[in-house]
Every structure is written in structure tokens, then in C-alpha cells.
Image (spheres, grey):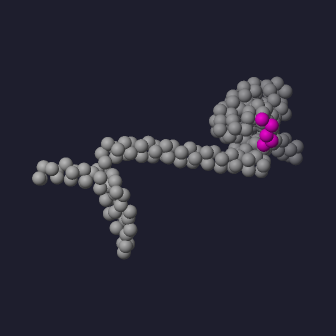
């Protein structure tokens, strides 16, 4: 009886070790006596005890955080850049057979590619053409990880840390640019105003009565200020049109 019980216990242990249950997002890469059998799952998977060995591979999208990298741009500016890589395993067999640790390998490849690509860019391009750089990083990393059965869907540069001296220089540059635009706008306004004044002067030169109307309008505006006494010099030329008109009508009245 003890021998029978021992045999039963051994059989139960072998049966338990032969049963694997894989989730919907998992695949099991099975090796039989060291040779690749293939990927199985999801659900119930039966293995031959002692003979078969299985490695689980997740097919879900993996979010890989690339640690900050020291990069010297093409215009010799030292910056720190970190990024995030989104990828997933498309072929579990290649992910296990072609590379020792696909997660570590993808991380190292992402770091070296990030330093290489950003080192070829100028600082202004890093700040203004972020989308183009992300696309170039995604293309290069995806091409190198394709033999491993990995598909890189997206690469995003998260943060660009500039030195304090460069931040101050960029702030001064931005301030100077705003002052330049303000001066240009003010000068353009003065130029347009001078053109309008020149047009108004031409109208007044053709119609002298317009100057008198402007004079009377000025008196109305000054009187609206609630001043008790208003002293306003009256030029003699203001009465010249009236005197000429009177001179024309005087002989006719005689």
C-alpha cells in the first residue's frame, strides 16, 4: 500500500506539472528536448513532463520608459532627453529564440538610437520638429526589432532638459524678438498715420473752409472739459475767406 500511494502521488504531481493554463493575452513557447515545437495558447496546454519546457510570452502592448540620456546636439548643446516606447510581441517564437531577453534588448536599442538620432539634430529642430523626430525614431527601432518578432508602434520624446544658461539665453532671445515685433508694429502704425495726415492736408489745402470747421470742432471739444475760462489764439488767416467773400459782395450792394 505505501508503494501504491507513492505511485499515485507521483502520478498526480506529473499530471499537475503537465497542465498549463494560459490567459487570452499569453502564448506559451514550447521546447521539447531543446527543440522548438512552437507557440500554443491561450487556454489549456498539456506538456510532456520532464521532456517539454514552456516559456510564457505576453502579447499585450509594453510601455518602455527610456531613462534620461545625455545628448550633445549638432550645434554643441548638451541636453538630457528621455522617451517612451510602445511595442508588442507579434511572433512569440522569434522573441524567445532570436534574442536572449527581448525586453532588455529593446531597451538598450532604444537608448542608443535616441542618442544617435538626437545627436544629429540642432537644438531648434529638437524643439520645433518633435513629431518628425518621433517618427524617425519609431522607424529605426522598429526596423531593428523586426527580426525579434517585435512591432514598435510609437516612440515619443517626453522631456527635454536644457542647461540653465541655455534657458536664460533663449529667454533673452524671445524677449528681443518680441521687442523687435513691437517696434515694427509701432513704426508701421506711424507710417500709416502719416499717410492719413498727408491725405488730410491735401483735402484742407483744396478746401480752406475745412480748416475753419476743424477749428470750431476743436473749440467744442475744449469746451466739453468743463473749463471756466478758455483762451484760444485765433489766427488772422482764419478770417481771410470771410473778408474775400465780403469784398465780392460789397460792390454789388452799392
Between 17 and 80, the one nearer to me in the picture = 80
Is residue 68 visible in this depiction of the protein?
yes
**Number of labelled discs?**
0
Q: Name the residue at 69% across, 35% down.
A: 125
Residue plotted at (25% across, 50% down) = 244
What percent of the width, then of the height, locates residue 18? 77, 37
Q: Residue at x 75, y 27 (%)?
A: 144
Q: Position of residue 115 (x, y in %)?
A: 79, 35
Asked if the stretch drawn in magenta spans residue 78, the answer is yes
Which of 109 and 162 lies nearest the eye of the viewer? 162
Let me know if residue 240 is in the magenta part.
no
Is residue 67 something one can see in this rendering? Answer: no
In the picture, residue 145 is in which quadrant?
A: top right
Q: Please, is residue 173 above or below residue 119 in the view?
A: below
Residue 97 is situated, as x and y percent measured from the top left of the image, at: 80, 27
Per the picture, the main secondary structure of the magenta-coloured stretch is: loop
The residue under the point 77% across, 50% down is 164
Q: Is residue 104 depicted above or below 168 in this figure?
A: above
Q: Nearer the viewer, residue 42 or 189?
A: 189
Q: Residue furthest bottom?
A: 228
Residue 166, compared with residue 109, is above or below; it is below
Q: Nearer the viewer, residue 100 or 27?
A: 100
Range of magenta residues? 75-79
The spot of residue 253 in percent (x, y) is: 12, 53
Left or right relative to 53: residue 158: left
Residue 114's quadrant in the figure?
A: top right
Amino acid at each position: 500500500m505505501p508503494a501504491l500511494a507513492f505511485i499515485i502521488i507521483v502520478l498526480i504531481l506529473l499530471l499537475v506539472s503537465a497542465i498549463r493554463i494560459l490567459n487570452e493575452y499569453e502564448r506559451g513557447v514550447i521546447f521539447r528536448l531543446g527543440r522548438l515545437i512552437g507557440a500554443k495558447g491561450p487556454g489549456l496546454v498539456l506538456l510532456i513532463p520532464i521532456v517539454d519546457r514552456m516559456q510564457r510570452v505576453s502579447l499585450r502592448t509594453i510601455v518602455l520608459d527610456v531613462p534620461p540620456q545625455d545628448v550633445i546636439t549638432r550645434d554643441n548643446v548638451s541636453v538630457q532627453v528621455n522617451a517612451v516606447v510602445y511595442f508588442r510581441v507579434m511572433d512569440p517564437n522569434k522573441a524567445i529564440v532570436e534574442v536572449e531577453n527581448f525586453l532588455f534588448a529593446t531597451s538598450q536599442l532604444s537608448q542608443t538610437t535616441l542618442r544617435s538620432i538626437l545627436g544629429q539634430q540642432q537644438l531648434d529642430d529638437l524643439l520645433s520638429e518633435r513629431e518628425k523626430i518621433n517618427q524617425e525614431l519609431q522607424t529605426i527601432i522598429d526596423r531593428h526589432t523586426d527580426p525579434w518578432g517585435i512591432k514598435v508602434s510609437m516612440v515619443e520624446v517626453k522631456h527635454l532638459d536644457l542647461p540653465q544658461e541655455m534657458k536664460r539665453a533663449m529667454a533673452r532671445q524671445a524677449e528681443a524678438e518680441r521687442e523687435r515685433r513691437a517696434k515694427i508694429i509701432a513704426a508701421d502704425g506711424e507710417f500709416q498715420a502719416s499717410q492719413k495726415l498727408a491725405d488730410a492736408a491735401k483735402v484742407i489745402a483744396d478746401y480752406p473752409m475745412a480748416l475753419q470747421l476743424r477749428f470750431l470742432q476743436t473749440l467744442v471739444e475744449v469746451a466739453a472739459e468743463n473749463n471756466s475760462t478758455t483762451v484760444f489764439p485765433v489766427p488772422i488767416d482764419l478770417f481771410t475767406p470771410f473778408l474775400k467773400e465780403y469784398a465780392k459782395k460789397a460792390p454789388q450792394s452799392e
